[in-house]
Amino acid sequence: MNILSAVSETAIITLKSRVQETQRENPVIQDAVAGECLEKIHSLLPTEVAERLIDQKLSTTLSRHIALRARKYDGDTSAFMEQHPDGLVVSLGCGFDTRYWRVINKPWKYVEIDLPPVIAAKNEILKDKIDYLTIGCSVLEESWIEKVAAIQDKQVLFLAEGLLMYLPQEQVEDLFRKLSETFSESMIVFEVVNKKQTQGLWKKIVELKMKQSTRTTAGSSYAFGVYDASEIETFGRNIQVIEEWSYFEDEDIEPKILGKFKNMKLMSRTQWTVKAKIG
């Protein structure tokens, strides 16, 4: 089985980061299922790819950043489910995420969406562990929205962790519009980058930096961004930004000196997370 594609390389690196963090002396997340998932993936990869993506240690700055981001989204998910016990959580571009087993110790309403090869690989690797709905399609397709709305169109939490910045600007705006027209009493938590990183010299600098830190060209070019989170509110009706978060604000950031930049928008609003109400 060939589980690798340009998209899944990025997913493997994200998975590897969480496993690497879990193995540290004082980890910020615990993710046993991620370790199991990575071990199985390793056995399916060509030797060269496994050595490049898995066997080599990632920078602690990168792995801690991804772990802190995961912890933030876990916290938002837990808070949402506490407030809405019958709520539905939808993970967009889920990759090899293992949030389902990290945040709640019992079955809960959850849906994962990613490209068909990624969903097929995840189902093959984790098999009977997956007892929730998975949908194999692009998040830019309208079919998944119809499927989710048929299940529930209120009190839905959408998660887009490390996803939207790689998608075309117009199509991301269209996605927000469709969500706002279809769902109510809902919420979306998503990562975004400053628009300057999607253009010109800044775009090339990001591509080079990502290639050096991840040892892959997958997921290294940003296409969607905003200068200010409030722009999101213009993408559809009844969208309201209620929170912004940057890992610069987290007390567990590494190296610690980065925390000194938490109030500098030039740094903290380069890549950050936004929470918004829908409907």
Image (cartoon, rainbow, N blue to C red):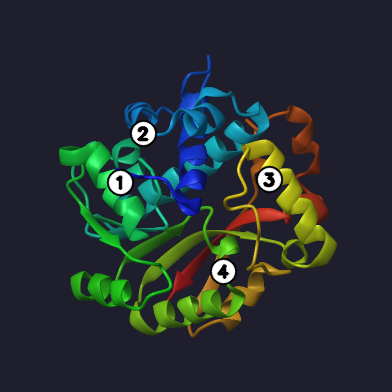
Q: Mark 1 and mark 2 in contact (Cβ < 8 Å)?
A: yes
Mark 3, other Cα within 10 Å: few <14 / some 14–19 / many ≥20: some
- The earlier-in-sequence mark between 1 and 4 is 1
- Residue 71 visible: no
Q: What residue would you read off at disc 2?
A: 41
Percent x, y of residue 134: 25, 56
Cα distance in 3D space between marks 1 and 3: 25 Å
Query: Image check: 52 left or right of 125?
Result: right
Mark 1 highlights which residue?
Answer: 121
Q: CA distance from mark 4 to mark 3?
A: 28 Å
Question: Label 1 vs label 4: CA separation?
Answer: 35 Å
User: Which residue type does callout 2 highlight?
Assistant: Ile
* Residue 210: image tag: 3
Of circles 4 and 3, which is in front? 3
Q: Quick one: label 2 or label 4, which is nearer the N terminus?
A: 2
- The percent coordinates of residue 76 (x first, y second) are 44, 50
Q: Say which amino acid is labelled 3.
A: Met
